Amino acid sequence: MVYINVAVCLSVLLLVIGLSVGLSVNTFRGRDALDSAPLIDGHNDLPYNLYGKLNNHLSDFNFESDLSNDSVWGKKACDSCFTDLPRLLKGKVGGQFWVAYVSCSSQYKDSLQLTMRQIDVIRRFIQKYPNNLQLVTEAGDIETTWRSGKIASMIGVEGGHSLDSSLAVLRLYYDLGVRYVTLTHTCNTPWADASTVDDGYVYNLTEFGQAMVYEMNRIGMLVDLSHVSHNVMREVLAITKAPVIFSHSSAFSVCNHYRNVPDDVLHLVKKNNGVVMVNFYSEFVNCNASRNATMEDVIKHINHIRRLIGPDHIGIGGDYDGVSSMPVGLEDVSKYPDLFDRLYESREGEPRWTKEDLEKLAGRNLIRVFQATEAVRDSLSSELPYEETITGNELYIAQRREGFNPGSCQSAIEWDNINVSEIEQSNSFSHFTTRAAYQRLEVNGC
Ligand SMILES: *[C@@H]1O[C@H](CO)[C@@H](O)[C@H](O)[C@H]1NC(C)=O
Ligand SMILES: *[C@@H]1O[C@H](CO)[C@@H](O)[C@H](O)[C@H]1NC(C)=O
Ligand SMILES: *[C@@H]1O[C@H](CO)[C@@H](O)[C@H](O)[C@H]1NC(C)=O
Ligand SMILES: *[C@@H]1O[C@H](CO)[C@@H](O)[C@H](O)[C@H]1NC(C)=O
Ligand SMILES: *[C@@H]1O[C@H](CO)[C@@H](O)[C@H](O)[C@H]1NC(C)=O
Ligand SMILES: [Zn+2]
């Protein structure tokens, strides 16, 4: 009996020693950083799919089911559908910017009305799942919301065309809960160029564009530089009073696509204390047409940015539901933890990611930028709202370049008293006018 007891005691002792040795050997995995800091993704276009597929009839959307094989939302039926609640939970997503995006084809037409519909559907979506989602409009609420077991849900507006060149609209978007505005989508606005101008420019950032940035600084709206031209990135970084974000952009020197951020701008982002949230889209992370993108490509972008400007200016902006091809290994929103495991493994020649670094990448960098933007807002609280308006001439020129019959669909006061013959005489429009614009001119409508 005694012998048996001693034997039991000994084996228990050995087990305890074994366990503690086992624990002291590092059992940490990269994904564990997502338990100590919220993973905040900068860009998810699920709301655009709700519009495209259901005209925002939320009652027909089965968010709480795994939709991987769904006949409408599954991989086989939809090449840009990657999101539902079970997969977000598996992906350990703690915060998400849901994007109010409307197509550039609505510019100078109903872009504002359509954007309002997207803001509305995001708000209704968040309200519909109160156990899992919560609207967050202040940086300080992200972490508490996440700790209470909900996904901190923020709203971003993608594309200055949604503002209809109006500071009033910008301010009211903020009041509706919007916390970032991407200055352009793929179309130039009359006051800022999109990445589609490559290294060149049509407008760069105009004086009115500068007023837009200053007003965003004053009210606490995050300035998002994804999608703008490389020159506009530089021009905004030269004047902004708050740190900027890139909600979904990768590194240009790893894959030369103009949606990505060039190295000189990365250095400016470090100086600005901003954050580049890396996009996963296959076409932006892998420029080699003879193979498919993989998670390794995304790792290359993240590590390039880290080598250049350190771990304090990188985040995650997957672009799920906004694009039609995701890298092997990052097929949907359930895969983020694999990326964090892989970064922590850190292969030969790669930077070493600590737990703290991974927490910054996951969400702490974004929270820092968000808080700094609020601090700038608070420091400017005695400034009055900017009252700049865009001029009729600027609107005329922009619409003319895009092949519209300028002003034919507008009635605002800016259109009064413009001298059309003067504008026509002093501008060569052909240089900037796209083929699509010419086709539109032939139709000659608005
Ligand atoms: C979807 O289909 C695949 C392949 O048939 C299967 O492995 C997977 O478990 C299915 N997922 C769900 C959520 O039904
Ligand atoms: C456009 O912006 C870039 C970057 O600031 C600058 O180098 C260039 O001169 C600008 N072009 C014009 C015409 O203002
Ligand atoms: C592109 O991918 C192919 C196939 O993997 C490879 O053989 C080739 O070296 C790659 N090209 C470049 C420029 O990396
Ligand atoms: C890329 O992936 C697609 C679909 O998974 C496959 O059909 C195609 O053959 C792959 N292309 C290459 C170059 O491997
Ligand atoms: C418009 O501009 C043209 C050319 O500069 C000028 O000749 C004309 O007088 C102007 N018209 C008005 C109403 O100012
Ligand atoms: Zn985008």
Image (cartoon, rainbow, N blue to C red):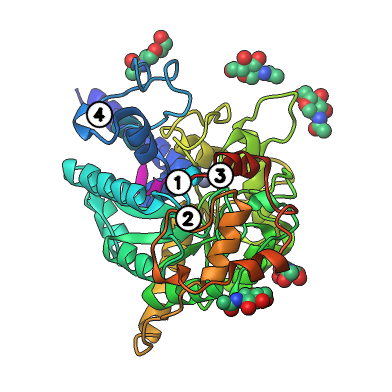
Q: Is residue 232 above or below residue 208?
A: above
Residue furthest bottom in the image: 382
Q: Quadrant of the N terminus?
A: top left
Tell me which residue sits at (62%, 30%) in the image: 294
Q: Left or right of 373: which side holds 1?
A: left
The residue that label 1 is drawn on is 106
Tell me which residue sits at (45%, 46%) in the image: 106
Closer to us: 211 or 82: 211
Q: Left or right of 366: which side holds 144?
A: left
Asked if marks 1 and 2 touch (Cβ < 8 Å), the reply is yes
Number of the front mark, 3 or 2: 2
Mark 4 and mark 2 lie on one chain; the one further toward the N terminus is 4
Number of the front mark, 1 or 3: 1
Q: Which mark is residue 279?
A: 3
Query: Which residue type carries mark 4?
Result: Phe
Q: Left or right of 127: which side holds 289?
A: right
Tell me which residue sits at (51%, 42%) in the image: 340
Tell me which residue sits at (22%, 34%) in the image: 58
Query: Which residue type carries mark 1?
Result: Ser
Number of the front mark, 3 or 4: 4
The residue that label 2 is drawn on is 161
Number of the front mark, 4 or 2: 2
Mark 4 and mark 1 lie on one chain; the one further toward the N terminus is 4
Q: Disc 1 and disc 2: Cα gap in Å?
A: 8 Å
- Can residue 127 be spotted in the picture? yes
Q: Secondary structure at mark 1?
A: helix
Q: What is the magenta range?
A: 92-102
Q: State the image quarter where residue 337 is shown.
A: top left
The residue that label 4 is drawn on is 61
Determine whether the beta carbon of the residue marked 2 sits less than 8 angstroms from the nearest atom of ligand 6.
Answer: no
Mark 2 surroundings within 10 Å by alpha-carbon count, few (fewer than 14), some (14 through 19), many (20 or more): many
Determine whether the beta carbon of the residue marked 1 sits less than 8 angstroms from the nearest atom of ligand 6.
Answer: no
